[in-house]
């Protein structure tokens, strides 16, 4: 694995760990204050926002480490170079798909931010906060896809298996 890929994974893990610690603190505070009959709305609403961010921001690492569910039986039937070429085509298609998602989600988040759209919960958090986190996560997944594309392209050129 290349050095930029390792740094990228460490940064993704650090960010996820920080968000998970904040989520834990929010939920623990909510439990303690609920036992004291003190209302604390950040536990549920803030926790929901953080869970959405953690899930979306974890996708780059799952993608980068190839830990997701994959249907690679067709690539396995092909000769090694053919399988790598098929994976490269998949990376290119995925980048086009992610680029479209980023554009659409960023546009939606910007319109909701400018329009002042708020959540239905008691805190009335701006919906754009969650949506901008999703856009950031999708951009990071694109970075992961580019790293995988480079890895597979190198493997195709050197006729070896991807590292």
Image (cartoon, helix red, strand yellow):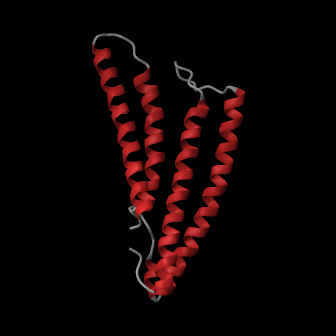
Figure quadrant of the C terminus: bottom left
121 vs 148, nearest the viewer: 148
With respect to residue 116, does 147 lie above or below? below
**Visible residue check, residue 74:** no
Q: Which residue: 47% across, 72% down?
A: 151
**Vertical side of 155 occupied by 32: above or below:** above
Foreground pick, 95 / 119: 95
Q: Residue at x 68, y 25 (%)?
A: 116
Q: Is residue 101 left or right of residue 6?
A: right
Q: Nearer the viewer, residue 71 or 148?
A: 148
Residue 89: x, y in percent? 58, 74
Give the left or right position of residue 74, taking residue 22 as reference.
right
Q: Spot the residue most to the top.
A: 37
Residue 98 locus on image (x, y percent): 60, 57
Would you place residue 124 above or below residue 145 in this image?
A: above
Instruction: Point out residue 7 in the picture as x, y percentages from the top left corner.
Output: 41, 55
Q: Quadrant of the N terminus?
A: bottom left
Residue 8, compared with residue 69, is above or below; it is above
Direction from residue 101 to residue 18 in the image, left or right: left
Going by the picture, which residue comes out furthest to the front? 3
Does any portion of residue 53 appear in the rendered image? yes
As drawn, is 49 to the left or to the right of 117? left
- Which residue is depicted at the point 65% across and 38% down? 109
Q: Position of residue 5 (x, y in %)?
A: 43, 61
Question: Tag count in the figure?
Answer: 0
Q: Quadrant of residue 106?
A: top right
The residue shown at (45%, 33%) is 48
Q: Nearer the viewer, residue 1 or 32?
A: 1
């Amino acid at each position: 694995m290349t050095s930029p890929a390792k740094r990228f994974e460490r940064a993704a893990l650090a960010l996820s760990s920080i968000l998970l610690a904040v989520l834990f603190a929010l939920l623990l505070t909510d439990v303690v204050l609920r036992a004291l009959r003190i209302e604390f709305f950040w536990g549920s609403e803030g926790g929901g926002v953080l869970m959405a961010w953690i899930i979306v921001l974890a996708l780059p690492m799952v993608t980068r480490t190839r830990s997701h569910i994959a249907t690679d039986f067709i690539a396995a039937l092909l000769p090694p170079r053919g399988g790598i070429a098929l994976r490269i085509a998949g990376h290119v298609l995925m980048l086009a798909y992610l680029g479209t998602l980023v554009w659409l989600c960023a546009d939606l988040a910007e319109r909701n931010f400018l329009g002042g759209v708020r959540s239905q919960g008691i805190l009335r958090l701006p919906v754009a906060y969650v949506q901008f986190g999703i856009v950031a996560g999708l951009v990071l997944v694109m970075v992961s896809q580019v790293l995988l594309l480079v890895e597979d392209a190198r493997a195709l050129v050197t006729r070896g298996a991807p590292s």
